[in-house]
Image (cartoon, rainbow, N blue to C red):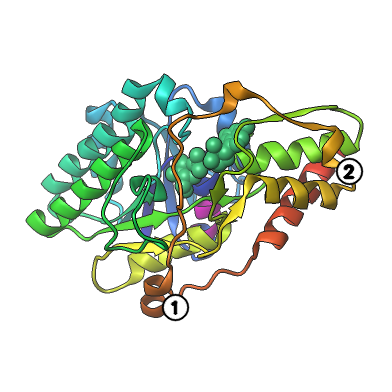
Amino acid sequence: MRVALITGITGQDGSYLCEFLLSKGYVVHGLVRRTSSIERSRLRHIYRNPEVYGKTLQLHYCDLEDATTLRRIITKISPSELYHLAGQSHVGLSFEIAESTVDSVAVGTLRLLEIIRDLSAPPRVFHAASSEIFGRPLSMPQDEQTPMAPVNPYGASKAFATQLCRIYREKYGIHIVNGILYNHESPRRGENFVTRKICRAAAAIRLCLQDELLLGDTSAQRDWGDARDYVRGMWQALQHATAEDFVFATGILHSVRDVVDRAFSEAGVDPGRHVHQDDRLLRGAESTSLVGNPAKAERVLGWKRETDFDGLIRWMVQAELADLKAR
Ligand code: G4F
């Protein structure tokens, strides 16, 4: 039986990956931060199922700062695959809490790799790298060869972790894959990320539960995909015979304004009366031109995304409407 360990299992990607691996017959272990118990909502439907929890799914308390506990859990479980998704992931927030961002994203990855390096039978490792490693790239679209040029503490931490994974792969022969993930969204996205914030506001305004939506730079553009497609890509990348890096992206840019227009149209609301700019939400040092070329993942792994931008926003708005109506 294949055994997988997921760091960051309570997050958007972790919860979808958990469901995906369980459906493939894996025994899944997940690390949960000691402080993140309320964030388990994304997994509630699984861990409340007595047929699953304690049998094919097990959660363990462990902070990435706690190397002793991390080592003990990894040694005891002896996973065949390890998906490293944990860490502070909000770009804007990384300016406010730079040190803890670097500690969880950069040094946390180093701690994990140091433990794995000592194992007699190391697992295959998937590291969730990010388009933020490219910052303000000189070329578009970016691929696996594009030089890193991060412009915020989060991107710099991910660049460190990504390069470290390459170094450990080469030096110690560990099977480590960097998945360079562009923005990927779902109804499980944290409410402080822009797509979720917009879709939830559109639904709440439609239901007369909210009147105003405040945003930062609505001209900012991103390459937005469906989180479920990216989680499938993580698994496909680890099944490949050789350890390599892969870009997972749609290859298409949309602006924040496009998200607003699509989401408000889906909710049947005129955005003009409700959406306003709040200068406090402007980042100053904004990443730009982040659009990925997924050709290698498509060619080598047979990865193919199933949802387009309109389908993604439709799904997210309808999920918010259903959720708010059920309250
Ligand atoms: O939704 P966002 O906060 O995502 P961002 O910064 O692109 O980062 C996400 O994707 C990365 C790539 O996969 C990940 F590495 C990272 O961990 C995270 O998952 O912002 C998207 C864009 C930005 O340009 C931001 O400036 O939306 C702009 N924006 C405009 N108004 C806003 C807002 N972002 C947020 N969060 N809130 C706003 O009100």
Residue nearest the viewer, comparing 4 with 293: 293
Is 165 placed left or right of 219 in the picture? left
Q: Residue at x 44, y 40 (%)?
A: 8
Q: Position of residue 116 (x, y in %)?
A: 19, 46
Q: Which residues are magenta?
A: 16-21
Q: Position of residue 190 (x, y in %)?
A: 59, 36
Residue 52 visible in the shown view: no
Q: Residues within 10 Å of mark 2 (few under 14, many from 20)?
A: some
Q: Assign the N terminus to one quadrant of the image.
A: bottom left
SS of the residue under disc 2: loop
SS of the residue under disc 1: loop
Is 293 placed left or right of 81 in the picture? right
Residue 17 in magenta stretch: yes
Q: Quadrant of residue 102?
A: top left
Tag 2 residue: 269
- Amino acid type, label 1: Gly
Residue 94 in magenta stretch: no
Q: How many numbered tags mark residues here?
A: 2
Q: Residues within 10 Å of mark 1 (few under 14, many from 20)?
A: few
Real-space Cα distance between discs 2 and 1?
A: 39 Å
Tag 1 residue: 302
Q: Residue at x 40, y 50 (%)?
A: 131
Label for residue 110?
none
Q: Quadrant of ligand 1?
A: top right
- Amino acid type, label 2: Val
Q: Position of residue 299 (x, y in %)?
A: 39, 79
Is 59 placed left or right of 118 in the picture? right
